[in-house]
Image (spheres, grey):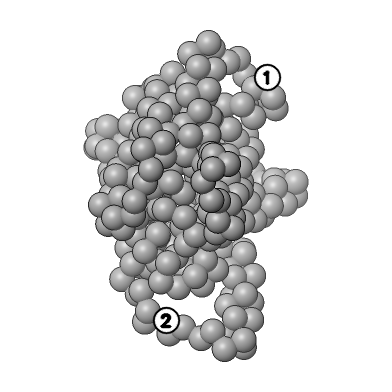
């Protein structure tokens, strides 16, 4: 199949997955939502294990430890995103979180000595300007604790996923893409412990609550992961990566339509600037 088709599938599924994840997080809470999504994701990816089991023969003890640690980064990043989605406007939270593309470029320059062009620097500046406009609150306006915490959680999520996406590249070169992504399953017991802890505190929530959003979140995000890596393996990376990486335009637009949350003019301009920077960075960064 044409890799461009897989790229567009990734664009659609990642965008839809983010919106359903926002619904799930707001219905269940950050940790409980992620636990359910992780379990369903593990089951969805389980049939792929036999075809990737041979790749583990290339894994050294260091790589195994690194993969588990990177799985922990995924855990923290996703919990932080879910907490942010419960505290601030979904379009705002998703825009800040999706700006991890800029962090990947900066970390690649620092850690791997990759060159950075003037255009990349400009678009990173555009993203940062957009985030500043999204999150800046003038002194004359009241800044609530919820808003402040929500922004910080979104930034934490962005930082974790940006670090994960940067450090995972040399590991993928050795053992492929599947195991670094599937490593989140190692951390399911931690989420289960958090779930039991909340249950003992009297915050029991039935597994039937938000069942369909959970299923759709896991299905769309995992299909997106699979399609993206299939597209990259098929070639045309300079075209595939920007198309797939533009998914925040869909998730932010859909989250605005779904939740109908009010944004200030300043926040709207900031979101638009950040999204333009994210898309443009994808086209010049491959």
On screen, residue 49 versus residue 214, left or right, reads: right
* Residue 49 seen in the current view: no
On screen, residue 87 versus residue 262, left or right, reads: right
Residue shown at 63%/51% (left/top)?
73
- Corner quadrant of residue 17: bottom left
**Dot 2 corresponds to which residue?**
207
Q: Nearer the viewer, mark 1 or mark 2?
A: 2
In the rendered image, the quadrant that contains the N terminus is top left
Helix, strand or loop status at disc 2:
loop
Farthest-out residue, front? 140
* Residue 109 seen in the current view: yes
Residue shown at 33%/67% (left/top)?
213
**Dot 1 corresponds to which residue?**
113
Residue shown at 56%/63% (left/top)?
185
5, 218: nearer the viewer: 218
Dot 2 surroundings within 10 Å: few (below 14), some, or many (20 or more)?
A: few
Farthest-out residue, top? 118
Question: As displayed, is residue 99 above or below residue 283?
Answer: below
Farthest-out residue, right? 62
């Amino acid at each position: 199949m044409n890799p461009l088709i897989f790229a567009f599938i990734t664009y659609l599924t990642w965008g839809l997955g983010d919106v359903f994840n926002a619904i799930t997080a707001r219905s269940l809470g950050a940790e409980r939502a992620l636990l359910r999504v992780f379990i369903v994701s593990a089951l969805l990816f389980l049939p792929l294990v036999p075809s990737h089991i041979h790749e583990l023969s290339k894994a050294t003890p260091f790589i195994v430890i690194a993969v588990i640690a990177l799985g922990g980064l995924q855990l923290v990043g996703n919990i932080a995103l879910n907490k942010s989605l419960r505290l601030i406007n979904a379009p705002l939270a998703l825009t800040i979180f999706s700006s991890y593309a800029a962090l990947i470029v900066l970390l690649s320059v620092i850690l791997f000595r990759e060159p950075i062009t003037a255009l990349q620097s400009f678009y990173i500046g555009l993203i940062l300007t957009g985030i500043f406009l999204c999150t800046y609150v003038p002194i004359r306006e009241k800044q609530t604790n919820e808003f402040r915490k929500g922004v910080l959680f979104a930034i934490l999520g962005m930082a974790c996923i940006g670090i994960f996406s940067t450090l995972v590249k040399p590991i993928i070169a050795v053992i492929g893409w599947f195991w670094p992504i599937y490593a989140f399953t190692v951390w399911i017991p931690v989420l289960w412990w958090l779930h039991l802890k909340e249950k003992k505190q009297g915050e029991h929530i039935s597994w039937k609550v938000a069942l369909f959003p959970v299923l759709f979140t896991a299905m769309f995000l995992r299909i997106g992961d699979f399609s993206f890596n299939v597209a990259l393996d098929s070639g045309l990376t300079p075209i595939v990566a920007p198309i797939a990486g533009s998914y925040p335009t869909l998730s932010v637009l859909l989250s605005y339509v779904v939740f109908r949350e009010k944004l200030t003019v300043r926040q709207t301009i900031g979101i638009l600037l950040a999204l333009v920077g994210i898309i443009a960075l994808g086209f010049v960064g491959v």
